[in-house]
Amino acid sequence: MTAPLVEVEDLAKHFAQASALRGGGPAVRAVDGVSFTVASGETLGLVGESGCGKSTTGRLVLRLIEPTAGRVRFAGQDLLALGPAELRALRRSMQVIFQDPYGSLNPRMSVEEIVLEPLYVQGARRGPELARRARALLDRVGLPATAATRYPHEFSGGQRQRIGIARALSPDPRFIVCDEAVSALDVSVQAQIVNLLQDLQAELGLAYLFIAHDLAVVKHISHRVAVMYLGRVVEIGPKDALYRAPRHPYTQALLASIPVPHPRLRRQRLRLAGDPPSAMAPPTGCRFHPRCPRAQAICRREEPALRAVGHGQLAACHFAEEAQGVPEPAVAAAL
């Protein structure tokens, strides 16, 4: 088997608070020991509640922010060991699509300048050849060539996100982090962007880390799915196996919350007690035990390791083998 394109091992990021800098308070453990791999041509979906560390993980993988601990390898190279010049050269192969299509584009730059900016950073010289490349990229993402001379404020949110995708494609990357790339868009536009990303993946062999909170979108686009809770990955596996028979109780609760698109069908809800604990003071043992309906004494004492539980799935739960999965929708007795 070939080595994965991206390998993440025990990645962590702890943000010091102002009081912590003076020695008086705990750090925020935004990401705290995350491990996963992404193969060439594969999409790994990364899901979880707001504040669980998904976007921070994406930025750490690209080394947009420096990790506190851990290791990231891209095509066998240790990203954290690279100097500024080496890292800049490697960034041609790693790009990002940001969540906000309004805040991620410079309003003072034309669309052509935005799309070609990654190449300018790499030392490319302006000229007619690059201008033709910009128009070809716009055409590839479904925008007319005339868009090149216009400015971001002249486009809708979906069109701006297409510009962001064209910018990510300009240096011919192998790996793209899609950081909530469709979350700010209307549902119909989301479908168009997701289909575009899939078409580009099939055409160019791209690998994606697809960060989102919409589980239906993640299921549609991903090959494998990783579930995060309070800075850690609690379950990861092939999407069909994970959606059919989730092994971690948090994954079960997430999937049970997906609306069923039929007025006479409903799914039993798995209600979780309380709110997520603070990332400044994670609970001992399993981080999910204060909200878990199956928690026992061992869960409060020992933190479970992420281990194989069958069908290609890994789960960080002491009782993963006893999981019953998500109840299937049942016909309502009365409407």
Image: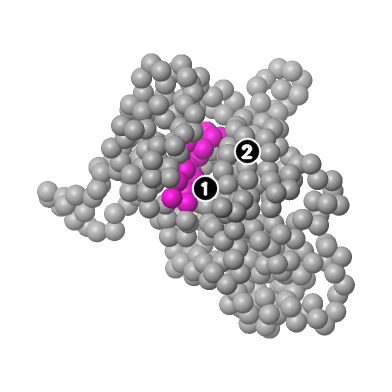
- The one nearer the camera, 232 or 202, is 202
Residue at point 60% right, 51% down?
Answer: 4
User: x%, y% of residue 176?
Assistant: 63, 58
Q: Give residue 46's mark.
A: 1
Residue at point 38% right, 16% down?
Answer: 297
**Location of mark 2 (residue):** 9
Q: Residues within 10 Å of mark 2 (few under 14, many from 20)?
A: some
The verdict on residue 141 being magenta is no
The verdict on residue 226 being magenta is yes
User: x%, y% of residue 72?
Assistant: 68, 43
Q: Is residue 160 above or below residue 243?
A: below
User: x%, y% of residue 168?
Assistant: 68, 64
- Of all residues, the one furthest to the front in this rendering is 1
Q: Which three-letter amino acid code belongs to the residue tagged 2? A: Glu
Q: Closer to the N terminus: mark 1 or mark 2? A: 2
Residue at point 46% right, 34% down?
Answer: 307
Q: Which three-letter amino acid code belongs to the residue tagged 1? A: Leu
The overriding secondary structure of the stretch rendered in magenta is strand
Residues shaded magenta: 224-238
User: x%, y% of residue 327?
Assistant: 25, 44
Image-based side of 244 in relation to 110, left or right: left
Q: Say whether marks 1 and 2 touch (CB < 8 Å).
A: no
**Mark 1 element type:** strand
Image-based side of 134 in relation to 86, left or right: left
Q: Is residue 288 above or below residue 251?
A: above
Residue at point 50% right, 19% down?
Answer: 284
**Mark 2 element type:** strand
